[in-house]
Every structure is written in C-alpha cells, then in structure tokens.
Amino acid sequence: MSALFNDYYLNIAVMTCLWAALSGAWNLMAGYGGLVSLGQSAFFGIGAYITAIVYTKYGLSPWLGLIAGIFVTTGLAVVISWPCFRLRGAFFSLATLVFPIAMEIVANNWSDFTRGPSGIAIPFRPGLDTFIFSSRWAYLIAAFVLMMMVYGITRWMHRGKLGLYLIAVRDDEATAASAGINTVKVKLVVTMISAALTAVGGFFYAQYILFLDPPSVFSIDISVQIALLSIIGGLGTPLGPIVGSLVMTPLDGVLSQFFGGGPRLLIYGVALLAAVLLAPKGIVGTMKAWRRS
Amino acid sequence: MKQLALAALALAASTFAAQAQETWRIGALYPLTGSLALLGNENLNGARIAVDMINEKGGVVGKKVELVQGDASTPDKAQSEAERLSSLENLQIITGTYSSGLSYAASQVVERRGGLYWETGGIADGLTKRGFNGYFRIVFTATSNGQLAANLAASAIAPRLGKKPADLTLLVVHEDSDYGTSVATAAENKAKELGFKVAGRLPYKASTTDLASLVLRMRASGADIIIASSYANDALLIQRQMKQLGVNVGAFIGTGGIYGLPSFGESLGNAVNGIFDTEGSAAINPASLSEEARTLLAEFQKRFEASQGKPPSYVGTQGFVGTYILLDKVLREAGSADPAKMKAAALALDIPTGGTSLGWGVKFAGPGNEMQGQNERSFPVAQQWQSGKLVVVAPENVKTADPVLVPLPAWDKR
Amino acid sequence: MLDILPQLLVSGLLIGGVYGLLSIGLTLIFGMLRIVNFAQGEFIMFAMFGAFWLHALWGIDPYLSIFIITPVVFGLGQLIERVVIKPILHAPHAMQIFATFGLSVVLQNLALTFWGPDYRSVQTSYTSQSFIVGNVAISATSLYAFLVAFLMAGALMAFLQFSRDGKALRAMVQNRYAASLMGVNTDRLNRLAFGAGVAYAAVAGCILTPIYYTYPTAGVDLIITAFVVVVLGGLGSVAGAMVGGLIIGVTQTLTGFFISVELKDVIALVLFILILLIRPQGLLGRAGMEEVGTK
C-alpha cells in the first residue's frame, strides 16, 4: 500500500487536480457560455510567467505574482472580448487561437523581462511564502483546493442567475437579448472569471514544475487538453471536468509507461475521437441520461 | 474501483522492480514525440547502442544493463516521466535529454531525490550553473559552439578570402528557440570581439514557410560570411532560396542540429559541399583518439549504420559516448548504483583529451565551481561538407582535412 | 532600395499563391459544411508522404503523383466524412472542433508511428531552379504552385457556378432545409464537398513536396497561415482564399525585409485581428456570413 503514496502517484494526483481545475475554468466559458475558446493557454502562460518573473527577477513573493497575474489576465480577457464577442461558433474559436501565439512571441522577444527563449528556471527554495514544497502532499492539497474552488464556482453558477443567463445566451443569443439580458456583460463576466482561474493554475504550475519557457506554457496542446477533459467528462456540468481529468490524466501516465511516443498519442487521439463521436454528452451526461431512462 | 486499479498497477510495478534485480536499470529520458522528436530519437538510438555493446562484453561487473525509456516531449511531461522513472521504477540514474528546457524540468526531480542526472545533449549554459551535486553534463555549452563559429571565420575563412576580419561583413541568422538564440548571441559577440563588421543578428521562427525576405536581407547586408543556427525546414529553405534568388556568400557556417545530419546532405546534393558546421563530430580524426576510443567509434558507426540505415550524426554519437562513459567508466568504477558512489566516481573521472570517441576528455568541474558538473574537456569542432560527407577541419589536432571551397562558388557552379 | 521592390513583390506573390493553394480546401469545407477542418494540414502531410514514397520507390515525379494521390485522398475523404463528419454536422461547436482535432492527432501519429520523425526531401532537376526575368528571380517550384493554385481555384469556381452539383452546393449553403425540399441530396453533397476539400489538400501536398521537407508534423506548420488566409478572404469564398493568400504573402515578405524576419509571421496575426474587428466576414465574404449556418 505504501507504493500508492509513492511520489509518482502523488504527481499524477497533483496533475489530475490541476488539469481538472484548468478544465473547469474553461468549462465555465465553453460549457455554460458556449464560448469555445481555444486560447486558454494565453491566460495560463501569463499567470505562470508573471509568477516566475515576480519571484526570480524582483525577488518578491510569488503570491504577489499570483495577484498580479489575476489582474493582468482579467484585463486581457476584457481586451480580447472586444473583437471576439461579435463572432459566433467556429469563428470565435479561430479568433481565440491567436492570443497564445501572440503571447508566445511577446515572451520570446521581451528578453529583458522574460529571459526570452531560454525560459525561467525557478530556484528550489521551499516555504509557504514561496509556494514551493519538498513534499508532493502539500502540492496535492493545494491543487485539490483549487479544483474544489473551481467546482464550487461552477455549482454556484449552475444554480444561480449568472448561469441561467449564460445558458440562455449560449442557446439563443438573439432571444436572450430581447428578453432583456445584457449579453455582452454576461459573456464578459464569465470570461473574466475563467481567465482569472486559469491564471491561478498558471501560478501553481510555475511553482510546481519550476521551469517554464514560451513554447511550453503557451502551447496549443494545453488549450486542447483543457477542453478535451471537459468534453470527455461532460461539457456544461460541474463534475464533468473532474471526471474527465480523473479518467484521462492517469490514463496518459499509464500509456507512457507501456507505450512510447507515436503509439501513445495515437491511442489518445482515437480516445478523443471515440468520445466525441460515441459519447458526446461526456461521461457525466451519458450517465445522467442512463439514470433517467 | 479506482483504488483497485491503482493497487493492481502498483503490484505490477513492484513485480517488475523485483524481477529487475539482475540488471542495472538506467533511465533514458528523451523527447520521442513532438517537435524535437527527430533529434531526441537520434540521441536515444546512440544511447541504445552503447548499452548493447556493454552488454555483449558481459555487462558491468557481471550484470547486464537495461535502459528504461521515458518520453519527455514537454517540461511537464519531462517532470512526470522523471518522477515515474525515479519514484515508480526506482531508478537512481537517469540519462537524457537532448533539450535544455526538458533537462531543467527533469533534473529538478532527480536532484531532489538525490539521484544522478547524466546529460548527454542539452547545451544551455545555465544547466550547470545551478550548483546541483548530481547533475553532470558531458557535452559542451552553447556559448562555446557560437564562439567557435566566429573563431573559424577569423582563423580559417578570413585568410582564405584574402582579407582581415575588419574588411569582412558577417551576418548571424538563427531560429528563435533557446538553442538558436544562445549559439547565435555567442557567435555575434565573439565576432564583434574579433573585429568583424557584424551586420546584425536576425532571428526568425523555425516553423516559417518562407524565408525569401531573410535571404534578400542577407544580400542587402553585403554579408561575406553567414553564421546560421537552424532547425530543419528553415535550413533547407535558406539554401534553396539562396540559390533561387542568386544570393552568394563567401562562406556559410551552420552550427549544429540539421547542418550535421545526412538528410541535409541528401537534400542539397552537390550544393552542400563547402558548407561548414560547428558542433561535435561523429567522424573525428582517429589519429587524435586513444586506441580504445578509436575501436569503439568504428564499432559504433558500424552498428548504427546497420540498424538505422544511415551513418550516425553527432547527435547520435553524443548519445553513444555519453552513455558509454556512464556505464563503462562511472558505473564500473562505482560498482553499485548508489548515487553517492556514482557521483564520487564521476567526479574522479580524469580521461585525457582524445580518450572518448568524440575526441574529448572527461573531467567534471567540482563543487564550488561556478559551472559545477560541466565537462571541462569537451569542445566543439569545425566541420565542412566535402564530397557529400562531413569532415573535421579545425582544431588542428583533430582535423581530417583542410577547408576547401572558400570562397563558395556561385550557385550555378555548385 | 527601390530596385529590390519588384523582387520582394514577386517573392511575396509566389508564397501567396502557395498560401492560397493551402487554403482552398479549407474554405471549401467550411463554406459547404460549416465545419472548420482542423485536420486539413494532416491531409496535406499525407499527400506529401505519398508523393515522397512514390518518388523514392518508383521515381515518380511529385507533379505526376498528383494524379495518383488525389483520387485516393478524395475517396478517403468521403469515407472519413461518413464516419467522422456526418455524425457531428449538427452537434455543438465544441464537438465539431474536437472531432476534426482528434482526427488530426490520429493522422499525425499514424504518420509518426509508421514513418518515424525523420525529415525527408525530394530532389528533382527543378527543386532549386529559378527563372530570371530582368533583375527578378522567380523560383520554379513556387511558380508552379502559384499556377496550379489559380487553376484549381478557377476550376472550383467554375464548378460551383455552372455545374448541377455546384449549384446544388451553393443552394445548400444558403438554406440547407429549403435545398433538401427542392430535392437536393444533401447527404451525398456533403460527402462530395468534404472529399473535394481534402482532395485539394492532397494537390497542395504534392505540389509542395519539392519545396519543403516531409515529416509527420509538416501539416501543423503549414496550416496555421491557411487559417488566417481563409478568415481574411472570407470563410467559404474560394476567390477570397486566393486574394487573402496573396495579400498575406506580400505583406509578410515586405515586413520580413523592411522590419524584421521574426515579425513577419506576427503580421499575419495582426491582419487576422484587424479583419475580425473591421470586417469579420472577410474581404470577399458576404456581410453576416460569420453567423450563417451556426444555428
């Protein structure tokens, strides 16, 4: 049994919670609001970079970086919304693709600030003030808390007015507007919340992995992974992202153990296709349908 | 239900571990998928041959060696694979990683667990500036590669062009990743130091689909010498578009990566001759090597060619030499996989220059040194494509040929 | 400095033609099916591998291999349409996006598993050839790509305008329901449209084989600009794809020369955002088009 508390499994548990949290943040926008963003890694990377820069360049506590990251990403969310909200469906998604690419270029070139392509390696100095821990347990607790926070926010929205308005906007924006809902405000609020939560995930990532560079934190793969987990688990449900992450994150780990490279990703891709084609309501959605029938 | 599955996994894993007592288990962490897959796989292929050769000679102190592979395509995968190899598979010795970014992430994990991280490919200077006790890097740094390119321009190319550096214009172009930028910056600084007229340092994205604007800038700058650091597609585009647009230069110096791979030679045909490449060499002058190193190199080249269908590049040879030294010298000396003994054995290594198949010696900078863990006896060499093959043209004691084709003939004559 | 301008313009137009070629299939699929095919790059990549192997094994010239590879990909496309696309035609956008995305991951890693990560290239007598006109050099392979792009675009536009199936397709775009009421077999035409869209990708792949390396992730690098081109030109507009391609090609080359090579790839993004802000339906798209078919 002690093998279960092996660092390897703890690491998988930490990443499962982190991905669930990030995916949950996306689920707010995409599942409830119908805003299928493919650019979440922009917020993630900014959160990670600001944390790393505040800590390594200015010697301040990364917690300050967390707060700064939240401010910057919510500001960016407002800026992004202006051109993108006018677009619908796939257009919106395509537009969101641009922002991580732009951020990556900024990070790569603003070397004085971000150390450019070399990235930032964060020195290992454990402590609550630095949010760096030698024990994976501490990280697990923090990641779990983050995940539950996102879950809590999702449930609050699920029942509340904001959620109701969002779903109305998602399903039929024109009618929602004519019913008196301020559609722009509703979409903006959910985007800002999603951005802020994603930035918190970035902060966590920086202090956990202790290394980041432009291609790794702004990659499209992160944006895809975040979305994938919610889709598999159940888009538009509070438990969806968690279930999706519980299934896929350890699966990825197991696949790494037994398959190398190409075959592993191939299986992953097939799993994605199967989920989309055969169980589009996701695991949670399909189970709910079973229970009802 | 989850618990049962996890328990089953744990049981399976510990069974594996129990069975493996009869072999030395070494972790091998490389990018096998993703954008770095090409060279990550090449590195690993070299490492595998080292293991095969050691095992055929009876292994190390009677036990065979087994490489346990991990795929580290991104820093967080590198971290989790390093975790898997060190925590789950209980490996205290991990080798890798080809890419510096991945090495940063993976070696953190290993250092904290007190293990040994043996880097056979990552060249970022910062990797050996962290004061890690268990991190050993056998290859040279990015800075030394860039500096060599500039030195080559001054010492071998300028005289053959009949001019002094001050009369020559030099331009540095590079893809904007960590590798390209570090090498290019070092080259630019050294070139300035040596008195060249440096027209600039032009970064570009490796994934770009067109470099006509870059090539036209080369011509507009009047560059006599180009130093380039490229990934793959971009290197091919540069050469082809230089030819199509009729841009001629006196000398073109690549700095590793694709410039040393057979596919580069194949894709350009005769036009590749005359292009320089600074990195390590897969075919250093055998006369500069010790008897043992020479024999090992020949054996390695034969096996690589047999299994991969093409001669090894420097990247593959790097994987071979690094892993061979780890097993044959460090592990054998330590006699056990105990990290403390391995580290002591590594620090005690004192192989003179010429003692490894890359022409390097091995002596790691010790604790207290700014570059702790760096192999002080590794060095890049300057090579040139001649008759479709890479030959070493500098430094003097390891070269196999002299530079030719300086200045490069005009495109229509190549 | 002015004497470099003609060369810059020509080079820009040539790469613009290549972009157009890459984008035609993408815009066709979006126009007809309202699906963004995130796997379009992978069809291009597979065609490149096809052309490479035909050349490596039997010495077939990449331009000739178009005639072999395109029909194969067309058939494959129809099969994939039935299995992957048809089920999600009316699904929520997230599903549509991830269906084609999943397809892209599967195709990329099939290539990686079977052919490895190596970079392959094809050399022929004309791979580095160029024509000199005055003081302007024109790359042979890019010129051929340019010509083929316009030919294919023209052929497609003629098909859509004059042929029976083409008219039916256009009717479907305007009002799917009404079209089916008029006897249009939307099912068959969907398959045709998707098959044609990826067949165009196959043509692009063969034409590009002499220009770039062939490797499993080749599609990824090539397709990013295609997305920008398609949005710039107007999703669904074939003429728009060509015009958009040319604009981006010229702008990139000029930016790369006068400002910075690194920034030239950014300029496409800037144009992308500007178009979304100023004229979201694209240059040649119809107003409100960005909302059509999303219900």
Image (cartoon, grey):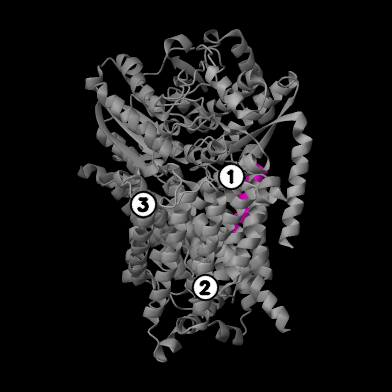
The relative height of residue B163 versus residue B200 in the rendered view (above or below) is above
Q: Position of residue B113 (x, y in %)?
A: 57, 38
Q: Position of residue C129 (x, y in %)?
A: 44, 37
Q: Are marks 2 and 3 on the same chain?
A: yes
Going 39% across and 65% down the picture, which residue do you hit?
A: C233
Q: Return the residue nearer the eye: B300 or A44.
A: A44
Range covered by the magenta-colored residues: C104-116
Provide the secondary structure element on which disc 2 rests.
helix
What separation in Å lies between label 2 and label 3 (alpha carbons)? 27 Å
Query: Amino acid type of disc 1?
Result: Thr
Give B408 or C128, whichever is nearer the viewer: B408
Q: Quadrant of the N terminus of chain C?
A: top left
Q: Inspect this view and state whether residue C67 appears.
A: no
Location of residue C99 in the rendering, given as x and y in whole percent from the top left corner: 60, 65
State the residue in front, C249 or B334: B334
In the picture of the structure, the residue carrying the numbered disc 2 is: A152
Q: Chain of mark 2?
A: A
Looking at the rendered image, the disc whose residue lies closer to the viewer, 3 or 1, is: 3
Q: Residue at x 72, y 79 (%)?
A: A290
Label number found at residue B33? 1
Q: Is residue B108 left or right of residue C258?
A: right
Q: CA distance from mark 1 to mark 2?
A: 37 Å
Q: Is-magenta flag for residue B174?
A: no
Q: Which residue is rendered at x = 37% and y = 37% of the image?
A: B181
Quadrant of the rendered image containing residue A267 = bottom right
Residue C108 belongs to magenta span: yes
Q: Are marks 1 and 2 on the same chain?
A: no
What residue is shown with label 3?
Answer: A61
Q: Amino acid under label 3?
A: Ser
Which subunit holds the residue at mark 3? A
Give the quadrant of residue B164: top left
